[in-house]
Image (cartoon, rainbow, N blue to C red):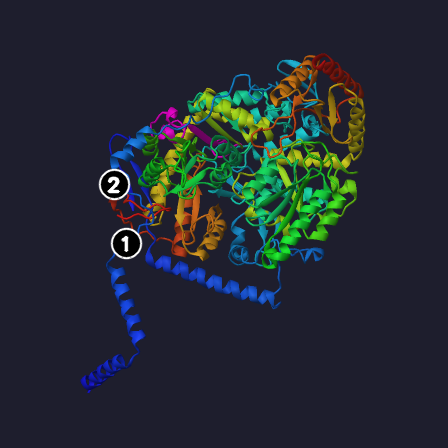
Amino acid sequence: INHIVHNGGLYKRPFNEAFEETPMLVAVLTYVGYGVLTLFGYLRDFMRQWKIEKCQNATEREEQKDFVPLYQDFENFYNRNLYMRIRDSWNRPICSVPGAKVDMMERVSHDYNWTFTYTGRVIKDIINMGSYNYLGFAQKTGACQEAAAKVLSQYGAGVCSTRQEMGNLDKHEELEKLVARFLGVESAMAYGMGFATNSMNIPALVGKGCLILSDELNHASLVLGARLSGATIRIFKHNNMQSLEKLLKDAIVHGQPRTRRPWKKILILVEGIYSMEGSIVRLPEVIALKKKYKSYLYLDEAHSIGALGPSGRGVVEYFGLSPEDVDVMMGTFTKSFGAAGGYIGGKKELIDYLRTYSHSAAYATSMSPPVVEQIITSMKCIMGEDGTTIGEARVQQLAENTRYFRRRLKEMGFIIYGNEDSPVVPLMLYMPAKIGAFGREMLKRNIGVVVVGFPATPIIESRARFCLSAAHTKEMLDTALKEVNEVGDLLQLKYSRRRLVPLLDRPFDETTYEETED
Amino acid sequence: AAGVGQQWVLVEMVQAFYEAPAYHLILEGILILWIIRLLFSKTYKLQERSDLTLKEKEELIEEWQPEPLVPPVPKDHPALNYNIVSGPPTHIITVNGKECINFASFNFLGLLNNEKVKSAAQASLKKYGVGTCGPRGFYGTFDVHLELEDRLAKFMRTEEAIIYSYGFATIASAIPAYSKRGDIVFVDEAACFAIQKGLQASRSNIKLFKHNDMADLERLLKEQETEDQKNPRKARVTRRFIVVEGLYMNTGDICPLPELIKLKYKYKVRIFLEESLSFGVLGEHGRGITEHFGINIDDIDLISANMENSLASIGGFCCGRSFIIDHQRLSGQGYCFSASLPPLLAAAAIEALNIMEDNPDIFQTLRAKCERIHKALQGISGLKVVGESFSPALHLQLEESCGSRENDVKLLKRVVDYCMNSGIALTQARYLEKEEKCLPPPSIRVVITVEQTEQELDKAASLLKEAAQSVLN
C-alpha cells in the first residue's frame, strides 16, 4: 500500500508514506521459523529440567528456595530460548563518542551468549547507523563541547536538589526561554529525562473522568503516562484519521461508559516520527479534527525535533502549521541536540501549571548544568544565533542524506517502511534467523546497525533500523549501501515487489473496541 | 450396484424413522425448527446505538464544552515562584541575588564542588562528548557505564548493579519489573513519591502499614497468611514484597531492618530497600543501612538508591544478586526505553566513589555534625525537630498548626525568608498535595553537609531560634 496524498487545502507538500505488504511466502516461512524455534525451546527446557543440559541461568538463594518464585518459567521462555541466541546484537559496548564513526569493544562468548568476555581489542571506525545522532551534535570537539566544559568547571556535575526547592539554577531559566523561542511558543519547561517527561506530566494534565486517545504504536513512556493518569484510554489505528474521528464522535455523543456523563476533556496523544515504523503523523488532519471536536493535542516530538522542517523546528514546521495549534508540544534533547532530557512547550498557563503541579518539578532532581549548556549551544547553532550557518547546513545535509539513502535502498529492492522524509529507515527482515545474521554480517563489514524483533515489533515484522545523521558523508553512505547490498544478496532480503498502488485514502477499518455493522 | 446400495440405505433410514421413540423425534423436530429460526433472524447487536439520529448527534457534538486544559494557577501559589540560584549550588550559594550558606541542597559529602570529581568529568567530556544518543540496547552502552556498574557492585559487595539515568525513575521502574497485577506489596506509609508511582505502575495490591510500626506490619502479614490458607493455589503464585526506605526522606527516621529480616523469613516476603538518603551516609564505610546494622547484604533482595545525594551526580542504581538485577535489563522501563546516562556524569560518580573509598572518615565527621545540629535545634519555641540524630536531612515542623495547611505554609515561608535574608539558605519541603497518599505536614528542610563548619552550624541554629521567636510569637 503506497499513499501519495496531494489533496489540496490541508497538505502543502506531498505526503508519501509506504508500508509494503508482507509477501505471503515470507510470512509463512517466518511462522514456520518461529515454530521450529519454539519446539527447540521446549526441548532444551526439558533437557535442562532433567539435567541433561547444564542450566546456566542465575538461580534463587538456597535460603529462599521455598519463597514464591520471583519469575514464572513461562514468562522467560522467549528470553531464554530465542532472545539469548542472538543476544550479541544488542547492548554492544562502545568506547568513543557516538558520532558518525564509533569504536566498539570486541566481545566474545564461549557459551552461546550466556556470558561475554571482552578480548580487550577495540574495533575502530565502525560506521554508526544506530545512534540517534540526527544533526551530528555528538562531538568531542567544537563549540558545544567547549561551552559545556566551561560550565562544568564552574558549576560542577550535579545539582542535588529539586526545581521547587533549591535546584533551579539560572542556567535552567536561560534554557527554558531559549526553548520557547526555538519552538515559537509562549513558554517552556525542561526536565532531566525524556521518558520521565511523558510519564510524569501526562498524569498532571489529565485524570479520572478524562479521555485519552492514543495511537496504536505510541512509545512506552506515553503509554505509561496515560496509565498512571487514571483516565480512560482508547486506541486508534496507527495514523488512521477515520479511526480517530470515529472515536472522537462516539466519545462526545455517548459520554463516559455506563454513567453517560460528558467527558471532562479529551487528549489526543501522537508522536512526530514513530521510531519503529519511520512514519510521520498526519498532523494537518489531526489538527483539523482536534479543532472540530474541541479536544487537546499532545505531540511527542522525540525524534522529529531538529530532524524535520526546513530549519529544524520539527514536524509543525515541516507541514507549515502554526505551533499555537498544538496544545502541548513535548520533545527530547537526546536525539538531535546530543544531550539528555526533555521539554514541554505551550501557553504560559500550561507551563505555570506544570511548574506547580508536575511530579518532576516537586520530586526529581533538576538537569545537570553541563548538559544544559550543551543544549543551549546546539540550539543556538541550529537557530543560527551563534553567527555561523553550521546548523542550517546540517539540517539540509540530513534531509539530503535521508532522501538519497531511502531512494537507493528502495532501488535495490528492499522493503522499506515509512515516510520518504523520515531519517529513521526500517528495513524489513521478517525471519528470526535473519535478525541475528544481519546484525553480525554488518558488523563483520564494519557497519553498526540496530535490529529489532518481538516484542518491540509484531512477531513476524522484525526489522533493521538505520538512523541517518547529518554527520554521515556521502562516502560513508555509499560504503554502507554497498555493504547492505552485499548482505541483502547473501541473506536474500530483497523482498520488494514494488507494488505501487496509488491509494488516496486508506479504507476504513473497524476500531478495536466495538463491533459495528456496515 | 451403487443404486441398489443407495436405495437399501434409504430403506434403512425410513425404517429407523418409524422405529425411533416419540420423544426423540419431537426433540429433533424442535432443534431443526430452532436452527431454521436462527438462520433467518437478524444479526444480534451488542448495544443499541442507533437510537440517536444524525442530527441529534451533531447537536451533541456542538454543545459539548470541555474543561480548559489546565485550571489557572494563582500568582502567589507557593510552589510557582522558584528560587533562582546563580552559580553553582555549592556550600556558599547565591539565591535570588543574596549570598548564603547552603542548608538546602542534598550535597552530604560536599562532592559537588570537588576538583577531582570535576576533572574526571572533564576528561570524560573530552573523550565522549555530552550525550549518549541512544538507549542501552542500541549503542548507548559505554565502557564508563560498565565500569560504574562494576564499581558500585564491588562497593556494595553485591553480585551486580544496574544504572538508570534518572534518580526518580530508578525505584519507579524497579518495582513494576517484579511486582505485577495480583501480587501483594506491603509498604510503609511514609514512603516517598517515587515509590508510590512505582507501586501505581505495577497494579499490585498495596497494603500500607503505619510508619515504622512492626506490630502493624505483622498484623497485616498474619491477615494475609489466613487469606492464603483459604486459597492455597492462588497463594502459591502470589509474590509478596515489602518496600521500605533506609532513611525516610519524609520523616528522617531510620527503618528497623533487623526486625524486618526476621519477618521476611517468617512470612516468606521479599524486601526491597530504597537507600537514597542512607547511601553514603550510614555505616562505617558508607555502604548504607545494611552496614549500619551489620546485616548480610544478601538478605535484602534489592537495594535501590539514587546517585543525586551523596555522590553528587545524576541518576540512580539498583544492586543485588544477579538473579534479581539481570531481570531489569529487559523489563525495567526506565532502563530499556530511555537514553543512557551521559558519560561525564558516570565518570563523576566513579570519581566520587573513589573519594568515598579513600576517605572513610568523612562519614564519622558528617555524623558528628548531624548530632551537633540536632542538639542545637532542640528547644526552639514553636518548631520541633523531626528526624534521627544522625540523619543529615531533618525536618522542622510547627509544634502547633494554625488551622489550615495554607496558613502553616505561609508561616513557615516567613521563617525561611527571615533566615535567607540573614545568610542561611533554607527551603520548605515541597509535596504535591493532591497526589500524595499520606501527605506529611508542612516543614522546613534542614540539610547538613560535611563542608559546613561548626560556627556555621551554630549560626544556623541560633538564627532559626531568632526567626521562630520573631515570626511565631
Q: Which residue is mark 1?
A: B43
- Most extreme residue toward the front is B22
Q: Magenta region: which residues?
A: A310-339
Query: Looking at this view, is B339 or B166 the one in front?
Result: B166
Give x and y (percent) for residue A244. 34, 39
**Left or right placement of residue A39 versus residue B408 in this view:** left
Q: Which residue is mark 2?
A: A504
Give x and y (percent) for residue A20. 32, 48
**Mark 1–mark 2 distance (CA, rounded to whole Å):** 33 Å
Is the residue A221 above or below the residue B81 in the image? below
Element at label 2: loop
Query: What secondary structure predominates along the stretch shown in magenta?
Result: loop
Element at label 1: loop
Is any atom of residue B301 visible in this view?
Answer: no
Pointer 1 and pointer 2 on the same chain: no
Name which residue type carries label 1: Thr
User: Could you tell me which chain the residue with mark 1 belongs to?
Assistant: B
Q: Residue at x 57, y 38 (%)?
A: B197
Give x and y (percent) for residue A24. 33, 57
Is any atom of residue B186 visible in this view?
Answer: yes
Q: Quadrant of residue B433?
A: top right
User: Could you tell me which chain the residue with mark 2 belongs to?
Assistant: A
Name which residue type carries label 2: Leu
Say the numbered circle drawn on residue B406.
none
- Neighbor class of circle 2 (other Cα within 10 Å; few <14, some 14-19, many 20+) is few
**Left or right placement of residue A447 versus residue A164 in this view:** left
Q: Is residue B251 magenta?
A: no
* Quadrant of the drawing holding the C terminus of chain B: top right
Q: Residue at x 76, y 48 (%)?
A: B296
